[in-house]
Amino acid sequence: MAPAKRPLNVVKPRDERKWSHRRLTDQIGPGLRVLFVGINPGVRSAVTGHHFAGPSNRFWKLLAESQLVPEPLTFEEDVRLGEFGFGITNLVARPSPGIDDLKPVEYISGWKVVDEKIRAYRPQVVALVGVTLYRAIRPLIEIDEGSPTSKPLKNSRPIPLGLQPALIHGARVFVLPNPSGRNANFSYAEMLAAFKALRRLLERPGTSA
């Protein structure tokens, strides 16, 4: 029996020349309630041209089950996020098989770009998708006057999910768990609880700062 053929649209991480040059399009528009910020695109996202497209990534499932959106969406429908007042971007535009491939300078230069997007679009909430992401950029966040001073976090100090004390150009900062299937630090129930907490924050009067 002949071995099954690999689908033509499947690109393996080692086929770097086929995906490393690709960049995702931000899904950001006016009337932004939440700007979701990921670390950087994975290989499948780069290949498909859509955010959180990894086969084990649970972002879109969590978005629907937390009732942040009224109907299930797939990664191919990321352009529809604007219908619900949501936007999505990445700290680092360069795709990679994992975050270990990223360099510290990419976090710094990437944050400058994201900071300008927040300044321009003025979301109510900046939802950082991943504790690692918040740990990396927290020292870079410019805290609004009157808020607690930002200090680098030691790697041993746990970062709680949810609302943080920082403000970025008036936007609240909310930390979500990385929904990747590789994330063994949180159960699906814990991830869902965090997404539901974001929904409850949006339901509060005066969420916009």
Image (cartoon, rainbow, N blue to C red):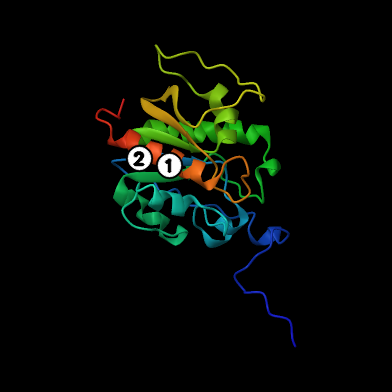
Looking at the image, do the residues carrying marks 1 and 2 touch, with CB atoms under 8 Å apart?
yes
Question: In the drawing, does residue 19 fall left or right of residue 62?
Answer: right
Report the side of 100 relative to 93 (left or right). right
Picture coordinates of residue 48, whole percent (x, y): 53, 62
Q: Amino acid at mark 1?
A: Phe
Secondary structure under the numbered disc 2 in the rendered image: helix
Relative vertical location of residue 188 with respect to residue 128 in this rendering, above or below: below
Residue 101 falls in which quadrant of the image?
top right
Q: What's the residue type where badge 2 is placed?
A: Arg
Numbered tag placed on residue 195 in the rendering: 1
Q: Which residue is mark 2?
A: 199
Q: Is residue 56 above or below residue 116?
A: below
- On screen, residue 17 versus residue 67, left or right, reads right
- Taking 165 as reference, is 201 above or below it? below
Residue situated in front as seen by the camera: 181 or 100: 181
Number of other residues with Cα within 10 Å of mark 1, as a class: few under 14, some 14 to 19, many 20 or more: many
- Point out residue 18 in the picture as x, y percentages from the top left corner: 65, 62
**Residue visible at 67% across and 40% down in the picture:** 102
Q: Secondary structure at mark 1?
A: helix
Q: Residue at x 53, y 39 (%)?
A: 177
Q: Which mark is drawn over residue 53? A: none
Depth check: give the residue in front, 20 or 141: 141
Q: CA distance from mark 1 to mark 2?
A: 6 Å
For this orientation, the residue located farthest to the bottom is 1
Q: Is residue 95 left or right of residue 67?
A: right
How far across and down, in percent of the image, does residue 7 sit? Answer: 62, 74
110 or 199, nearer to the observer: 199
Of 87 and 58, which appears nearest the observer?
58
At a point 44% along the width and 60% down the height, the residue shown is 74
In x, y percent, where is residue 49? 51, 58
Q: Name the residue located 65 percent from the left edge and 21 percent from the top edge.
A: 154
Q: Which quadrant would the N terminus be assigned to in this image?
A: bottom right
